[in-house]
Image (cartoon, rainbow, N blue to C red):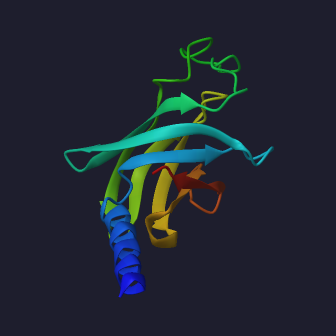
Amino acid sequence: MKKLLLALLAVSATGAAFADGIVGKWRTIDDATKKPKAIIQITESGGIYSGRIVALEAGVDPNCGDCDNAQKGKPLVGQTVLRGLRLDGDAYTGGKITDPKSGKVYSAKATVANGGKSLQVRGFMGISALGRTQTWQRVQ
């Protein structure tokens, strides 16, 4: 009975995370080092989803030193890096994502994966095939 109760609680918790879709906190992973880099808080307002940096891992440069836009030299924490996503079936599409290191803006889409534990975020130019995908991990 105890094992059954624990299993039901685990399924319930996973279902609750998935029910939230992309709303919540997500840990990004650095493409080069494969180490955690930042925490992104995704929120929803009027059916539009956006995400901003709320924390950085130790050792991450806290400023946008390499940006070539208005964000140059400004703190990364607080920057909105994901904007304009809308739920379209099982995916979130039509958004824009900003590379916080370079300041470059790309089209974006996202899909919840792994029972709500991860988020596949794709940034691309023009068509989705011309881009790359990052896997973000949900922060409990």
Residue 33 falls left or right of residue 123: right
Image height of 54 relative to 4, above or below: above
Outermost residue, front side? 2
Image height of 9 relative to 71, above or below: below
Outermost residue, left side? 46
Residue 6 falls left or right of residue 69: left
Q: Nearer the viewer, residue 92 or 130?
A: 92
Q: Nearer the viewer, residue 116 or 47?
A: 116
Residue at screen point 38% across, 86% down: 4
* Residue 83 visible in rendering: no
Outermost residue, right side? 33
Residue 87, position in %: x, y?
A: 32, 60
Residue 101, position in %: x, y?
A: 66, 28
Image height of 72 relative to 104, above or below: above
* Residue 51 visible in rendering: yes
Image height of 98 relative to 61, above or below: below
